[in-house]
Structure formats: structure tokens, C-alpha cells
Image: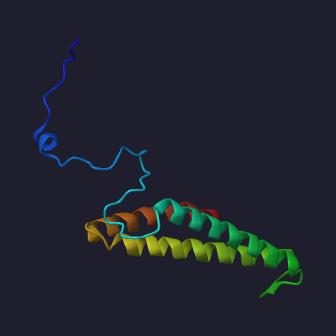
Amino acid sequence: MRTNRAPPSPSTVCAAPNPSPPAYEGVTFRDPLDLSETPAYQRTMLGALLGLLFIRVTQLFLDNNEEVSLSAFEGANAKKVLLILLVMTLHSFSEGVGIGVSFGGEGGKTLGIFISASLAVHNIPEGLGE
């Protein structure tokens, strides 16, 4: 059985073959420019475990220090303020790293501006929620 297919476009015919196997959309662990000796999945798992460790250490610190005070806040309110302050600081730091890295590649300026604008729009609802 034959299907009616359009002939391939010149850009498809001239395109270089993709040496990596198909990946799920948005998820790829093979990057020819990645020069790290540690596989990407191990780095991803390490990052996730470090994040969980940070959350656990912070929780233990706040549970073991009942008399936390921060400015005019004391007790449970001071714990909440401190936790929000830490989380927002780390969140903003990671966004800053993302913006900095986006300016560094092949499409540096264009990608950097796009990522900066995306994060600016992303931060509008965050700011309204506080």
C-alpha cells in the first residue's frame, strides 16, 4: 500500500543525520558539547539528593531551635519567615544562574534575552502571591 507523501524539503534532505537515539521531548541526556566525565543522570540525581538533604537539614534546624527570633518575629512566625527567606534566596539564585548560563552559549544574546524575559513573566505571579 502506498501513501501520498510530499517530497522531502531541501532542508530535510541536506540535514546532517542525528547520531543520538530519539529522546523524550524536553529530556535528553546526550549532548555532544558536554565534556563532563560524570553522566548527566548522575548529576541530576546528585542535585535532587542535595536538594532533599538541604530541606531535611533546614527542617531539623528549625525543629531543634524553638526559640528562633528574627526582627519582630518570634517562635513559629520567625520560623516561617526564615524558611521563606531561605527558599526565596535559593530560588532567586538558581534563576540568576539560569540567566547567566543562557547568555553564554552559541545563541548567547538572543537566548539570554529570551530566558530573562521568560523569567520576568514567570516572576509576576510569584510576586503577586507573596
Q: Residue furthest front?
A: 37
| Left/right of residue 79 with respect to residue 46 in the rendered view | right
Query: Where the N terminus falls, by quadrant?
Result: top left
- For the point 35% across and 60% down, the residue is 31
Residue 48 lies, in percent from the top left, at: 60, 64
Q: Residue furthest bottom?
A: 71
Residue 42 lies, in percent from the top left, at: 53, 63
Task: Please say which color scheme the image uses.
Answer: rainbow
Residue 119 lies, in percent from the top left, at: 45, 65
- For the point 40% across and 75% down, the residue is 100
- For the point 26% across and 66% down, the residue is 107
Residue 4 lies, in percent from the top left, at: 19, 18
| Left/right of residue 44 with respect to residue 14 in the rendered view | right
Query: Where the C terminus falls, by quadrant?
Result: bottom right
User: Which residue is at the front of the view, 112 or 123?
Assistant: 112
- For the point 38% across and 56% down, the residue is 30
Query: Can residue 124 be seen from the camera position used here?
Result: no
| Left/right of residue 71 with respect to residue 51 in the rendered view | right
Up the image or down, 101 lies above or below 20; here it is: below
Instruction: Tell me where residue 88 sits by quadrant.
Output: bottom right
Instruction: Tell me where residue 2 sits by quadrant.
Output: top left
Q: Residue furthest top?
A: 1
| Left/right of residue 75 with respect to residue 7 in the rendered view | right
Up the image or down, 45 lies above or below 6; here it is: below
User: Which residue is at the front of the view, 25 or 43?
Assistant: 43
Query: Can residue 84 be seen from the camera position used here?
Result: yes
User: Which residue is at the front of the view, 76 or 98?
Assistant: 98
User: Which residue is at the front of the view, 51 or 116?
Assistant: 51
